[in-house]
Image (tube, rainbow, N blue to C red):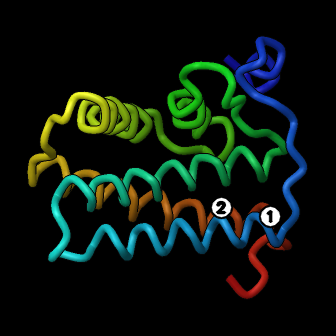
Amino acid sequence: MTLENLLAIRQLQTHAAEPAAIRKLLEAARRNLADARVESISADNRFDAAYKCAMQCAMLGLWARGYRTSTSQPGHHQTAIQCLGHTMGVASEDIIVLDALRRKRNLSDYEGDPVSEATLAEALSQAARLLAHTEAWLRANQPDTMGDA
């Protein structure tokens, strides 16, 4: 499904993000990844911070393309992740892993399932890779959004 199709079915909305807003969200993603690496924090909270970094990167891709998820619609996290291929050319195998982490986040947040060390390690790896990809993509495709970030 294309971004335009998702707009038509109201899973996405148009959004004109200012470069300063993109830089601000990028900085928040960097802070979340740094927090996720703090070993004295529980695995659950480190996972949450890594997941938040990944979601912020997904939002950055949408914003840079002129969209945002429709938060009034269910599944906006899933939509943001699944759009990564369209927004920033993220590989489908990475999107599958990120979506699995989204499902794990739901189980952790809403059912209290603990986060394993292996799941945490995967979340940290994926968040770091996606953040690096997002930064490189923004530099190459939206350099005006990078500023001094």
Numbered badge on residue 137? 2
Task: Examine the rendered structure and indicate whether residue 125 appears above or below residue 24.
Answer: above
Vertical side of 49 occupied by 87: above or below? above
Q: Give the position of the C terminus as an image quadrant.
A: bottom right
How many dots with numbers? 2
Return the residue nearer the eye: 38 or 123: 38
Amino acid type of the residue that numbered disc 2 sits on in the rendered structure: Trp
Residue displayed at 83% across by 14% down = 8
Question: At numbered mark 1, what does the secondary structure look like: helix, strand or loop?
Answer: loop
Q: Quadrant of residue 11?
A: top right
Q: In the visual, does 27 lie left or right of 18?
A: left
Please tell me whether residue 126 is drawn above or below residue 80 in the rendered image.
below
For mark 1, what is the residue?
A: 142
Quick one: 107 or 125, which is closer to the camera? 107
Q: Viewed as shown, does residue 119 lie left or right of 145?
A: left
The residue that appears at 19% across and 35% down in the rendered structure is 112
As drawn, which residue projects farthest toward the top?
9
Mark 1: amino acid: Gln
Tell me which residue sits at (50%, 67%) in the image: 132
Asked if marks 1 and 2 touch (Cβ < 8 Å), the reply is: yes
Residue 10, position as x, y percentages in the image? 77, 18
Q: Where is residue 131 drawn, in percent x and y?
A: 50, 63
Residue plotted at (17% across, 75% down): 39
The image quarter in which residue 71 lies: top right
**Where does residue 93 sit, x and y in percent of width and height?**
38, 35
